[in-house]
């Protein structure tokens, strides 16, 4: 289910020292075929390091890290990895098929192999689960969660704390699916296609000043609700940037609205700059308590909305930038 890819895997894990506590740093090395850039970025909320990729695709570096999940970004593709000091993680991957080809070995391989299998399993889930009646929906949720529980149970050599946190993530996943289901029912009944969209007024613009929805009238508007801490949101950034480039100069505006709380305001500005985010970059003044977000019932992100030039709703839960059906929708609208 592409809407919920990585929900299970992106949790900051406080794990015990175990067999990997002998070094106060982690080592990571490997080779990337068909590389997308000359560097890798390893990032978390409080950590960032750039690793150089050599001409032949090899890389190697050491990182002093807090135990947990990190966002690995090569300029186009993204991956989540689990790191702790003492790891000597080796990886190989073809950047053209990142999830399908990534392989790990060395100290730290077990948790990362588990996470890769988890992502592949998640990718097989069908988003139409949210269209089922309530009884069939609940049956399908139990089936999906059962697969995740079996994968976790059958993976050897995992830290006990990692297992505990991943088990909690499966529980949280059930809650997330229920929230997404309720959200879709609300959209179907209250944010129907052709109805006038709620409006945002005077949102801070990264480039200066403020922007309101009425400022964009006369064009289609594709809105991305995201946050700096949201792994799945950041996973959509490369596709969104490509989409914005493809449709530059056409009758559509791409608007990204951060729901970061006030204490992350500077982090929002830094990420927009560092990741060279394009389109219209705004931040909601009260995070999820903003009237516009409450009107759209934003319970989970990323969430995308498409409006027509008259400010009417085309799709209150539009396809993601990474999904081909978004291009089909744009073509149908002759954008």
Image (tube, rainbow, N blue to C red):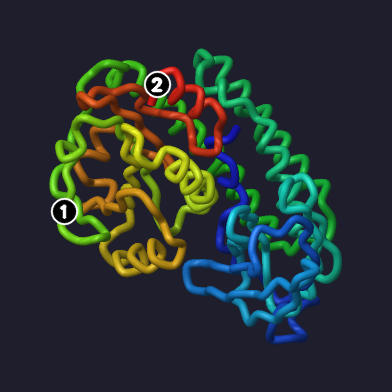
The residue mark sitting in front, 1 or 2, is 2
Question: For mark 2, what is the residue?
Answer: 334
Q: Quadrant of residue 33?
A: bottom right
Q: Nearer the viewer, residue 134 or 264?
A: 264
Position of 224 with respect to 87 (left or right) is left
Image x and y of residue 238, in percent: 53, 50
N-terminal label among 1 and 2: 1
Image x and y of residue 59, in percent: 75, 73
Q: Quadrant of the N terminus?
A: top right
Q: Residue at x 72, y 38 (%)?
A: 121
Q: Residue at x 69, y 83 (%)?
A: 25
Calculate the distance from the C-alpha at mark 1 to the C-alpha at mark 2. Answer: 29 Å
Local SS, label 2? loop
Image x and y of residue 189, in percent: 31, 16
State the count of labels: 2
130 over 80 or under it: above or below: above
Local SS, label 1? strand
Q: Nearer the viewer, residue 234 or 280?
A: 280
19 over 124 or under it: above or below: below
- Furthest toward the front, the residue is 249
**Disc 2 packing (10 Å; few <14; some 14–19; many ≥20):** few
Q: Residue at x 82, y 51 (%)?
A: 155
Question: For mark 1, what is the residue?
Answer: 210
């Amino acid at each position: 289910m592409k809407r919920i890819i990585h929900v299970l895997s992106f949790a900051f894990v406080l794990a015990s020292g175990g067999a990997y506590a002998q070094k106060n740093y982690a080592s990571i090395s490997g080779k990337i075929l068909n590389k997308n850039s000359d560097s890798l970025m390893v990032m978390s909320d409080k950590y960032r390091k750039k690793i150089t990729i050599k001409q032949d695709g090899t890389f190697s570096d050491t990182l002093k890290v807090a135990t947990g999940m990190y966002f690995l970004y090569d300029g186009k593709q993204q991956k989540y990895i689990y790191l702790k000091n003492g790891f000597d993680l080796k990886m190989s991957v073809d950047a053209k098929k990142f999830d399908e080809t990534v392989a790990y070995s060395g100290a730290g391989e077990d948790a990362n192999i588990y996470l890769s299998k988890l992502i592949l399993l998640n990718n097989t889930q069908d988003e139409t689960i949210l269209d089922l009646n309530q009884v069939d929906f609940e049956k399908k949720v139990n089936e999906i969660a059962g697969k995740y529980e079996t994968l976790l149970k059958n993976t050897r050599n995992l830290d006990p704390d990692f297992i505990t946190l991943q088990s909690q993530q499966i529980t949280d996943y059930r809650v997330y699916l229920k929230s997404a289901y309720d959200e879709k029912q609300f959209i179907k009944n209250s944010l129907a296609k052709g109805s006038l969209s709620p409006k945002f007024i005077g949102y801070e613009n990264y480039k200066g000043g403020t922007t309101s929805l009425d400022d964009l009238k006369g064009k289609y508007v594709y809105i991305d609700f995201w946050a700096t801490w949201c792994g799945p949101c950041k996973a959509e950034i490369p596709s969104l940037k490509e989409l914005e480039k493809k449709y530059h100069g056409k009758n559509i505006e791409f608007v990204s609205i951060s729901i970061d709380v006030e204490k992350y305001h500077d982090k929002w500005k830094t990420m927009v700059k560092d990741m060279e985010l394009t389109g219209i970059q705004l931040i909601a003044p009260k995070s999820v308590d903003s009237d516009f977000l409450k009107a759209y019932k934003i319970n989970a992100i990323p969430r995308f909305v498409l409006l027509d030039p008259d400010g009417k709703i085309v799709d209150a839960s539009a396809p993601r930038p990474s999904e081909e059906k978004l291009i089909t929708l744009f073509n149908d609208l002759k954008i």
